[in-house]
Amino acid sequence: MPQASSSIGVFDSGVGGLSVLRALIAALPHERFVYLADSGNAPYGERGDAFVARRTHAITEYLRSQYDIKALVVACNTATAAAIHEVRSSHPELPLVGVEPALKPAVGLTHTGRIGVLGTRGTLTSAKFARLQASLGGQAEFVVQPCDGLAHAIERSVGWPSGPNAPGTETFALCEKYLASMKPFGSAPGSIDTLVLGCTHYVFVEEALRSLVGPQVQLIETGEPVARQTRRLLEQKSLLAPEDPRARPPAPVLLTTGALELLQTAAARWLQLPPECCSTVAIP
Ligand code: DGL
């Protein structure tokens, strides 16, 4: 049985969910985290629901059996759309938090009434996303753009000295291409003034996106609300780790089914974590 001192599991198709882990560590510094990057099987976005649901189940079983996790954060919009309801029914006692494109907050923020949404094809063509969009029907216009290849390009670019945000990189070119088909951006009537990052990988190209859409456009991601929801759930179940101000925050455990160096580089670049935190696992 998991205890308050047990770890919180966090998983994504790859390194993108580190953007959510970063927000979780900031909001819950006394918690232990075990992060699983399924980089050996990434990207999920163009793989289809059955494949993504199978991986989500296998990873949930693995984290429960090997780490006795007290809660699971599915830090992947694509896996949340394809499988969260099934995980909820096969693990009814496990506190579970998913991520979905932040359309509701965007509706509250837009002035022009035009909201751009970037995500994977899997997320944006899912029934879950269609329901979310329909529930907000009439409140704003959504310009939805699946970004094939972008999450994969971000995974590949982690180790490059220039990083994924520099003009001239493959990631920058993809951002440019997808945003060009959504124009115009800005605060003028008829323009997109709010851009939802509906994939956890895209937080790591925020700088490139910002430089392309201009300063008047608000970019919205989901790390902080997910961290708040995780805290609420743990509080309800009396599973929050004790907050001892003298104790050093425990280092997270980072696991990957893919290349170790990729995870180590991403962890150093985005979370300032040492390579010893990272190791590889096989999850068939
Ligand atoms: N980071 C994931 C998401 O939030 C998936 C990216 C991918 O593997 O295609 O959707």
Image (spheres, rainbow, N blue to C red):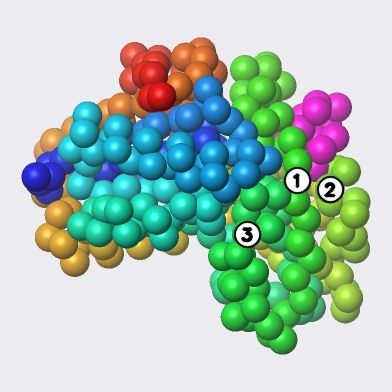
Q: Amino acid at mark 1?
A: Cys
Disc 3 and disc 2: Cα gap in Å? 20 Å
Split into 4 quadrants, where in the image is the N terminus? Answer: top left
Which SS class for mark 1?
loop
Dot 3 crowding, Cα within 10 Å, few <14, some 14–19, many 20+: some
Disc 1 and disc 2: Cα gap in Å? 7 Å
- Which mark lies nearer to you, 3 or 2? 3
- Above or below 281: residue 86: below
Q: Is residue 84 found left or right of 51 in the rendered image?
A: left
Q: Amino acid at mark 3?
A: Ser
Residue 204 lies, in percent from the top left, at 62, 38
Is residue 43 visible to us here?
yes
Split into 4 quadrants, where in the image is the C terminus? Answer: top left
Q: Are the residues tagged 1 and 2 within 8 Å (C-beta)?
A: yes
Q: Label 2: which residue?
A: 178
Ligand 1 sits in quadrant: top right
Residue 174 included in the magenta stretch of the image: yes
Q: Amino acid at mark 2?
A: Tyr
Is residue 111 visible to us here?
no
Q: Label 1: which residue?
A: 147
In the depicted view, which residue is nearer to us: 126 or 70? Answer: 126
Magenta stretch, residue numbers: 165-175
Q: Label 3: which residue?
A: 126
Q: Residue at x 71, y 29 (%)?
A: 153
The answer to which image quadrant residue 148 occupies is top right
